[in-house]
Amino acid sequence: MESKKVSLTVLERMATLGILPKQGSYTDLLLVRELREQLTFSEEENNLLAFVPLPEGMVRWNKKAEVEIGKKEVSISVPMLAIIVKELKSLDERKKLDNDLLSIYTLFVLDRKE
């Protein structure tokens, strides 16, 4: 299956995880599970980044460790990409995009080559 390799920052990984649907068809949920596994932070990353939950659902992490870890390359299949794009476009249409989603909207929707 054809896939697109993308390099994502910590914020982009978290933002993408945050928009993935929790319900859908059996096939879609299998794709979402595979995508979550790629985006999720390893135990080592969790320890280095030292995530701290803040009020209103926000999260803070060690920015120096983020530089050390760098971006993570993720392989996203065409069907996975379709799920991400659908969710982002839905948020856009409902005017529910926020600043944390701008870079992934640009990456997955605006920069997408048909």
Image: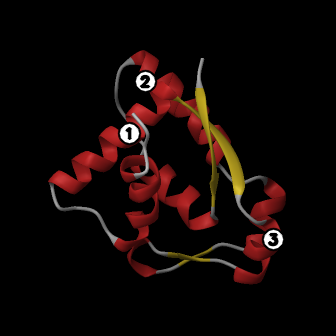
Coordinates of residue 72 in the picture (x, y in percent) = 71, 54
- Residue furthest front as drawn: 113
Q: Which of marks 2 and 1 is nearer the N terminus?
A: 1
- Residue 14: image quadrant is bottom right
Compared to residue 63, the image places residue 28 above or below, namely above
Task: Tell me if label 2 and label 1 are in contact, CB under 8 Å.
Answer: yes
Which of the pair 82/21 is nearer the observer? 82
Side of 40 where 109 appears, left or right: left
For mark 1, what is the residue?
21
Query: In this figure, what is the number of numbered marks?
Result: 3
Tell me the quadrant of the picture where the N terminus can be found.
top right
Q: Residue at x 50, y 33 (%)?
A: 32
Q: Earlier in the sequence, mark 2 or mark 3?
A: 2
Which of the pair 50/90 is nearer the observer? 90
Numbered disc 2: secondary structure: helix
Side of 30 where 111 appears, left or right: left
Q: Distance between the residues labelled 2 and 1?
A: 9 Å
Q: Distance between the residues labelled 2 and 3?
A: 32 Å
Q: Earlier in the sequence, mark 3 or mark 1?
A: 1
Amino acid carrying label 3: it is Leu
Numbered disc 1: secondary structure: loop
Residue 48's label in the rendered image is 3
Amino acid carrying label 1: it is Pro
Q: Which residue is drawn at 71% across and 80% down?
A: 62
Coordinates of residue 106 in the picture (x, y in percent) = 41, 58
Task: Tell me if label 2 and label 3 are in contact, CB under 8 Å.
Answer: no
Compared to residue 47, the image places residue 86 above or below, namely above
Numbered disc 3: secondary structure: helix
For mark 2, what is the residue?
28
Q: Which residue is drawn at 66% across and 43% down?
A: 74
Sort mark 2 into few (<14), some (14-19) or many (20+) by Cα contacts within 10 Å: some
